[in-house]
Amino acid sequence: MGDPRVLTVAAAAVVRDGRLLVVSKQAAPSIFNLPGGKPEPGESLLGALRRELQEELSVGPSDVTPFTVVEALAAIEAVPMRMTVYLAELDGVASPGAELAAMGWTSGRNDGIQLAPAVRDHVIPALVDAGLLVH
């Protein structure tokens, strides 16, 4: 699955009413990122996305569409990361799982949420450019 020195991540960009769903992990409760995570050995990116959303939010994704690939430094692990971002809806009401510290919605503007640099610098601008978030 590519360079083993690069962290591979599948993430969901869930946008509702002009706001993006973000989560923070217990390991770094002040940093908000997209829901998602790393594939297990032999697991596809979409398989990882489905599993991680179920683990983190107790729901699965629906209407999943590839959106963008972000190459940046991972906020928590501080290693190079390749994050494949999918636009997705959720097939139920999200409820934070045990590994999450918090769940919230952001406009991407300065709304008091500390976004991971990959989300702030790459995903938010791409969503704005696509007309999915309005600044």
Image: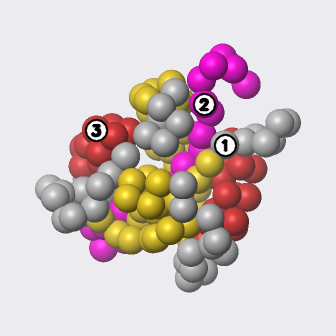
Residue 17 drawn in magenta? yes
Residue 110 drawn in magenta? no
Task: Locate the N terminus by quadrant.
Answer: top right
* Secondary element type, mark 3: helix
* Amino acid type of the residue tagged 1 in the rendering: Lys
* Amino acid type of the residue tagged 2 in the rendering: Leu
Q: Position of residue 128 (x, y in %)?
A: 24, 49
Whichever of callouts 1 and 3 sits on the residue coming sooner in the sequence is: 1
- Magenta residues, start to end: 1-20
Can you name the residue that lies furthest to the bottom here? 93
Q: Is residue 110 visible?
A: yes
Near mark 2 (Cα within 10 A), the count class, few <14, some 14-19 or many ≥20, is many
* Amino acid type of the residue tagged 3 in the rendering: Asp
Q: Residue at x 54, y 55 (%)?
A: 27
Whichever of callouts 2 and 1 sits on the residue coming sooner in the sequence is: 2
Q: CA distance from mark 2 to mark 1?
A: 8 Å
Q: Mark 1 — residue? A: 38
Q: Position of residue 68 (x, y in %)?
A: 45, 38
Contact flag, marks 2 and 1 (Cβ < 8 Å): yes
Q: Mark 3 — residue? A: 121
Total marks in image: 3
Can you name the residue that lies furthest to the right here? 42
Q: Position of residue 38 (x, y in %)?
A: 66, 43
Q: Residue at x 49, y 42 (%)?
A: 76
Q: Residue at x 75, y 50 (%)?
A: 47
Q: Nearer the viewer, residue 86 or 25?
A: 25
Task: Locate the C terminus by quadrant.
Answer: bottom left
Examine the image and state in which quarter residue 4 appears: top right
* Secondary element type, mark 2: strand
Q: Mark 2 — residue? A: 7
- Between marks 3 and 2 in the image, the one whose residue lies nearer the viewer: 2
Q: How is the image coloured?
A: secondary structure
